[in-house]
Image (cartoon, rainbow, N blue to C red):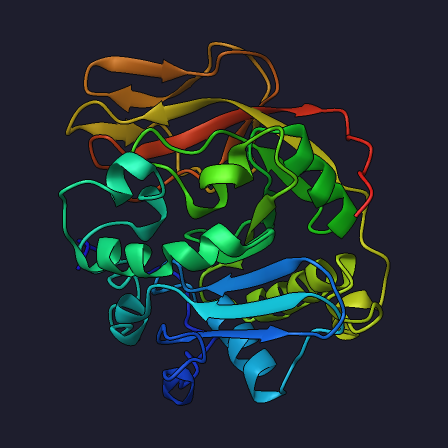
Amino acid sequence: MTPTTPSQYPIELLPPDITAHKPGNTGIEYVWSFASERDGPHVMIAAVTHGNELCGAIVVDEFLRQGLRPQRGRLTLAFINVAAFHAFDHKNPTASRFVDEDFNRLWKSEVLDGPRDSVELRRARELRPVLDSVDYLLDIHSMQHKTPPLMMAGPLPKGRALAAEIGIPELVVSDSGHVAGRRMRDYARFSDPVSEKNALLVECGQHWEAAAAPRARETARRFLANFGTVPAGNEDTAANETPPPPQRFIEVTTAVTIQSHDFTFANDYRGGEVIEKAGTLLGHDGEEPVVTPYDNCILIMPSRRLKVGQTAVRLGRFVPAPKAASA
């Protein structure tokens, strides 16, 4: 398991018992896929890409127990890093992010086809044929700190346009991922600008806050309704008592990758802070100062896992909203 530090947040969510879903119906454990008689895209909802992120597991478990089926196209519901999820421990809740390595840094052909081996790589290779057949992916995640939810739309206009179609959450982040490895949402044709295939990664709030589950549920329902997979209007009613605020779009210009074994932040950043002046000290990577590159710099998901080669924080700025593409 990955090294951990004690959690500073209460555990308000319970991990669902997903063992009933183990058989799957695809020849792959914990992966279920259902086809409609009507033509339509293949849409996938993915949960527990990281094993300690519970909100997606709650939603996919609900969908399967409710017997959710597509009214057009194909719907795949999948629990991803099941080995890490089953290792979740309330007494040490940050420890089960992964078993051997981060599942969400493996999605490049050189890695998937290479000689390395790990629990996560074996599972990624098993899931790869499913991802190759998916047209639209929603990967449900949560975050270390209790900050506003984020839609990670990737670097391409098509990702931003799809995020605008879904309409939530308020903050949409356009970025290129991590130096440490490629995310599942950036795999293959999802990151091809000429392909219609597309993917989003939603960060639903802090890992174990109660609000993360309804956020994940509403986002997944909106995502499915956007492609006609399920009828529109089935979103979480509690989450829709008031219209969502207009979305704001953020372009990440810099992913601060840790170079030394002595990285420290200058303040207790949680994410979403807007630093007014360029050149403001954010921290030190060994002896090297890390400063804001421009005025009104937004901090995206500062990490508590400060290891060489990993992303310490992403730096971004607000940009105009795109026009939504047609579904």
Q: Position of residue 70 (x, y in %)?
A: 70, 73
Q: Position of residue 20 (x, y in %)?
A: 41, 90
Quadrant holding the N terminus: bottom left
The residue sitting at 32% across, 55% down in the picture is: 124
Residue situated in front as seen by the camera: 165 or 42:
42
Q: Is residue 241 above or below residue 148?
A: below
Q: Is residue 196 above or below residue 179?
A: below
Residue situated in front as seen by the camera: 299 or 84:
84
Q: Would residue 156 appear left or right of 142 to someone viewing this image?
A: right
Q: Position of residue 312 (x, y in %)?
A: 34, 32
Could you tell me if residue 167 is visible in this image? no
The residue sitting at 61% across, 19% down in the picture is: 296
Q: Is residue 264 above or below residue 253?
A: below
The residue sitting at 47% across, 69% down in the picture is: 78
The residue sitting at 40% across, 76% down in the picture is: 30
Q: Is residue 85 above or below residue 308?
A: below
Q: Would residue 34 appear left or right of 17 to someone viewing this image?
A: right
Residue situated in front as seen by the camera: 99 or 228:
228
Q: How many marks?
A: 0
Could you tell me if residue 317 is visible in this image? yes
